[in-house]
Amino acid sequence: YINDTYKAKVYYGEKLFDPRWIAKRKHILNRDQFKCAHCKRSEVKLHVHHRQYHIIKRLNVHVNPWDYADNLLITLCESCHSKGHRLYEVPIKYI
């Protein structure tokens, strides 16, 4: 038995290998000058973080990661990203 939340996370994780996400990620890293927006470090592993998640209400599915507006994406180092997820819940917006 695999619950729906687990399946959704796995499916969403697979989308991070899509060429559209790879291009969007590169665009955001470029915009943020390949530096963590929080600690300003650049010599570490960088992540592109979604400031909020969007779920299409009628389908109950996440919006594709590359379909978010640029202002909802931010570059964070691995440490700041992990710390942020431990301290704060990413808001979910149903559309």
Image (cartoon, rainbow, N blue to C red):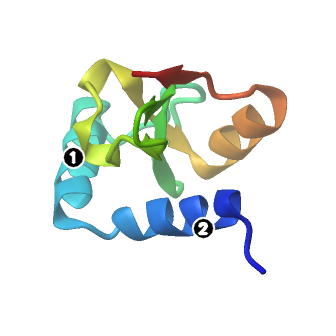
Say which of 75 and 43 sits in front: 75
Q: Is residue 84 above or below residue 12?
A: above
Crowding at dot 1, Cα within 10 Å, few <14 / some 14-19 / many 20+, comes out as some
Find the distance from the CA under tag 2 to the CA under tag 1: 24 Å
Quick check: 35 left or right of 77? left
Q: Specify whether residue 59 is in view.
A: yes
- The residue drawn where x is 42% and y is 30% is 74
The local secondary structure at tag 2 comes to: helix
Residue at image mark 1: 24
Residue at image mark 2: 7
Dot 1 amino acid type: Lys
- The residue drawn where x is 51% and y is 26% is 52
Quick check: 15 left or right of 91? left
Say which of 46 and 42 sits in front: 46
x, y percent for residue 51: 50, 26
- The residue drawn where x is 42% and y is 37% is 35
Q: Specify whether residue 43 is in view.
A: no
x, y percent for residue 65: 34, 46
Say which of 73 and 2 sits in front: 2
- Sooner in the amino-acid sequence: mark 2 or mark 1: 2
- The residue drawn where x is 73% and y is 28% is 89
Quarter of the image for the N terminus: give it.
bottom right
Q: Is residue 56 above or below residue 2?
A: above
Say which of 13 and 83 sits in front: 13
